[in-house]
Image: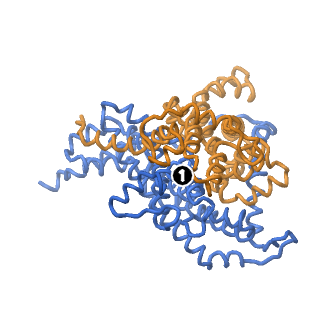
Chain colours: A orange, B blue
Amino acid sequence: MHRTKPLDHVILIIGALFLVMPVVVAFMTSTHTAAEIHRQGLQILPGSHLAETYGTVLTQRGGFTGEITGMRMLMNSFILGIGFAVGKIVLSMMAAYALVYFRFRAATFMFWVIFTTLLLPLEVRIMPSYGVMSDLHLLNTYTGLIVPLLASATGTFYFRQFFKSIPDELLEAARIDGAGPIKFFIDVIVPLSKTMIAAIFIIMFVYGWNQYLWPMLMTTDESFFTLMRGIKSILQVWVGSQIPDYNQAFAMAVLAIIPPVAVVVIFQRWFIKGLTESDK
Amino acid sequence: MAELTSPPAAAPRMMARMAARLRGKAADPAKRVQFDSRLLPWLFLAPQLAVIAVFFYWPSIQAVQSSFYLEDPFGFGSTFVGMANYADALTSNSYQRVARFTAIFTVLVTFLSLSLGLLLAVKADAVIRGAATYKTLLISVYAIAPPVAGLIGMMFFDMHIGPFVKLAAWFGWDMRVGLNYFDTAFAMIFVSVWKQIPYNFIFFLSGLQAVPVSVREAAFIDCKNGWTRFRTVVMPLLAPTAFFLLIINITYALFDTFGVIDVMVKDKPANNPITLVYKVYDDGFRGNDIGGSSAQSVILMLVVFALTIVQFRFLEKRIHYG
């Protein structure tokens, strides 16, 4: 019914180039040596130092203590991303189940207690949160890295919306069959939520992986550095060096980009469903 | 006879209203049947409540509390100073400058990333050939973290190797990102918009694709002008999505751009443009001004509260959700 105009394609191609080219250039440039980049600027064609640069970034011991390698940072980023996503799903599914499927007096109040957390992002309460962590001796631990990030209701909100869309008949049938709340949760709700869990896992993995400010404050011990933190330290080293390690900085950026982007592109359908269907 | 037939422009509008009603979701589907148990709901809620009590409510209360105190920089206790921290923050020149920049930054980032996202979504919705490829390409950069976007952006605006700087030089613009206030602000806005377009694209595209084919066909028959059709049929149906995105984009510009800004100012905020969140962090962690930083946090909290209230009370009434 609608005839495509050539202009539509032109706009889309320009848009796609505008969004994707910087990443392509970042990758291509990372395969050249720092001196080449310094002389010739950013590169659009592949160079011959791919293995060398990435080998260095992944295995070279860096930092002040010489404790941390790119490999270690990659692992820490995965621990943060996966730990955060799993923690979020477990906590929020349970809480949403209690809010939707139980009749208890404080339900409405608890709803507000939980959903108020949506109003204040971590960034605005960053100082006192840091204080609490140091009081609890959780600085430089994985617990300290992951658990405070769980203190928001996004996941609970998604699951609550989803549970509300599950037909009531299922619960009626289950009760007739004599299933209790725990059995109903494990045998009916969890299997039904599979797609939703997958979608939320992707969104939360990306969110956890991309955390910057919190890991930066929480980790002074370099063995807990994530890739995001590594990017900051690579830039701090630059000040005063003759030829900055452009290639290594780009390689680090590419490493930090690949896992979340791959997850989003591969699981596009689930991800878009999860993201857009639970917003309203 | 003109009075009896409705003017042509009214038809699509009516169509849109009907479509909205058709798309309508049922009222809040609270469960008719629920479990009755005293203990179980609390067991299910316990982990989430524990986490938010310790890591949300406790620190938030502390932020409010310490905003009324002046902390001794050497750690010898603190003195109650009432509203002095707030007064200091609000009257200081540097705070006002940062607040002004934050406002301009937020408006520009929100406006540009929303309009570009919408433009691309409308075009991606219109084409058939290559639609899947465009979609994949356009959403792929969604998952890039703000500091990584900042790093890549910094390279593109680098004085030695940056292609954008060379491009600007052609037009006689001597761009000095990191040294010149305006140039740095330009680069920050550019990078922040770049990073946010895919998000808006995803939401606008799925909003567009939710418009029923029957509505589109009816509108197409009634109205040949593409722009009018877009304005009178598609825009009202997209309004809830656009509104939701407006709030999300404002919070993005206010808070999530921290990574972009931190990477781009490279720990030298002195002459560079920064946002309010960056100032909270800078004053608190590097300036060791805990009271002042907390007061700024509380001011930001109030801004977020106000935004949320606007969301629920004011604007929502004007937008008819399906």
Can you say whether B161 is above or below B304 in the image?
Answer: above
Mark 1 — residue? Answer: B150
Give the side of residue A8 with respect to residue B138, left or right. Answer: left
Q: Residue at x 24, y 34 (%)?
A: A1
A100 or A221, which lies in front?
A221
B42 or B75, which lies in front?
B75
Q: Quadrant of residue A57?
A: top right
Chain holding disc 1: B
Q: Position of residue A268 (x, y in %)?
A: 49, 32
Q: Quadrant of residue B274?
A: bottom right
Which residue, as the protein is rendered here, is positioned at the far top?
A177
Which residue, as the protein is rendered here, is positioned at the far right?
B76
Q: Residue at x 40, y 38 (%)?
A: B210
Q: For the residue labelled by badge 1, is the local secondary structure a helix, a strand or a loop? A: helix
Q: Position of residue A14 (x, y in %)?
A: 34, 44
Q: Residue at x 47, y 38 (%)?
A: A28
Q: Residue at x 72, y 62 (%)?
A: B285
